[in-house]
Amino acid sequence: MSRHKRKSAPHPDPLPLGLLIIDGLEGDLARVELPNGGTQDIVLSQLPAGLKEGDVLLVTEAGAVIDHTETQRRREGAQTQLDALNAQAPSGEIDL
Amino acid sequence: MTRWLTTGLLLLASTAAAQGNLIIRFLDVGQGDAVLITSPEGKSLIYDGGRSETRMRELIQQYQIKNVSLVAASHADADHITGLVPVVEQFRPQLFLNNGLAGTTRIWSKLTSAAQQAGTKGLVAQDQVINLGSVKVTVIPPPPGMKAGEQNTHSVGLLIQYGTFKALMTGDSETAETEGWLKTYPASALGPIDVYKSIHHGAKNGDHPAWLSAVRPSNVVISVGPNNYGHPTTQALALYAKAGAAVYRTDLNGTVTVTVQPGGQYTIKTERGKSTPTPTTQPRSQSTPLVIPATPPAGVNVSYANCTAVRAAGKAPIRVGEPGYSRKLDRDGDGIGCE
């Protein structure tokens, strides 16, 4: 009689530590921007519930939480910068 | 020998420009979008830049890009904007077309800072025509009513017209956005389209029958690379087949180049694999659908244990679609292994 060892479910990789930013949501995956600027796909079930595109996550040894303050700070800062950039846009038909 | 060949090719390229051709290149950037559009007068715009600064620098060299007048970000996702950073730094374009919705990522911040440094002016998408030399570029802004804060449904589209030729690209828009466009524009303003960039790399929430029946594409280019999302989906491929469109994929065909003559006749060539053999012009039924093989053709069943083996074979870097490419050789998943 052969004995089959029961396969255990694979453990997900530990989350990268630091401030992660949700670049996009694709089905069951979140594409996150890592502190080094690269991106990585992470299964949503490993991340806090209810996160949205653009949210900033603080990941420590204790786990991952949405950093609402940092999210808001980055959102407002980036929007202000973009609005300033867009302020001098030409109107009407443009010839390049 | 190579030098003479290169010189010859450059001369041919110059001749093509002198004869008044529009050239559209759907660049092979792995998983992401990047389209280089060069007018007969040699003016260029880049619509999205893919997910890798390194890859875009290689492409700038490969295609001998001399100037870029406008960069367009369909939306702020990293796989669309990362490669725009070196473009802005190197060419200091006049304009940066965007959807007006800032991203929170570091790469978005890097892009807008680069634009600021370069003196590039921002341009929020609105119903507007941009003349890239003799090529008419119509901006298709997100329709009203899109959910606040969502990047995909705020994708900016571009309609490119040269003679009777029309190309359309619409970022990662989703059904809500394309339905909004169908209410905004008459179907006759959208299609038929000669060359169409598949929405969202062939995702299942992108193209849908009602939209495609307005667009009526003859040829579809899917900008796609190795990914975890299942792109392109069987649903999207089935839709393109049903539409009778020829399908090109940058993961299998490499960069896809469309050359358009002044009247609007055009040819499509691919870096790898089959190309459409004859100009796909009027009537549309002359277009020959390209059947993409599901498995590599016989005789290319090569595998390499690691990058040392690839280098020993003189095949590094090895790109997706080339014999022997595998995900294990491509750590960053940009479609180029053993870089």
Image: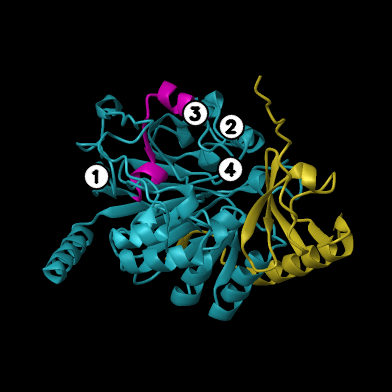
Chain colours: A yellow, B cyan
Q: Are marks 4 and 1 in contact (CB under 8 Å)?
A: no
Q: Residue at x 46, y 29 (%)?
A: B237
Instruction: Specify few, some or many for label 2: CA neighbours under 10 Å numbering under 14, 14-19, or 20 or more.
Output: many
Number of marks drawn: 4
Label 2 to label 4, Cα distance in Å?
14 Å
Looking at the image, residue B62 sits to the left or right of residue B177; the answer is: left
First in sequence: mark 3 vs mark 2:
2
Q: Are marks 4 and 3 in contact (CB under 8 Å)?
A: no
Q: Which residue is mark 4?
A: B228
* Start-end of magenta stretch: B236-255
Picture coordinates of residue A30, whole percent (x, y): 70, 47
Residue B252 sits in which quadrant? top left
Q: Which residue is mark 2?
A: B204
Instruction: Specify few, some or many for label 4: CA neighbours under 10 Å numbering under 14, 14-19, or 20 or more.
Output: few
Q: Which residue is mark 1?
A: B263
Quadrant showing the C terminus of chain B: bottom left
Q: Which residue is mark 3?
A: B212
Q: Marks 1 and 3: which is nearer the front?
A: 3
In this rendering, is residue A26 above or below B1? Answer: above
Label 4 to label 3, Cα distance in Å?
25 Å
Picture coordinates of residue B181, whole percent (x, y): 59, 37
Chain under numbered label 4: B
Picture coordinates of residue B315, whole percent (x, y): 30, 58
What residue type is disc 2 on?
Lys
Residue B301 sits in which quadrant? top left
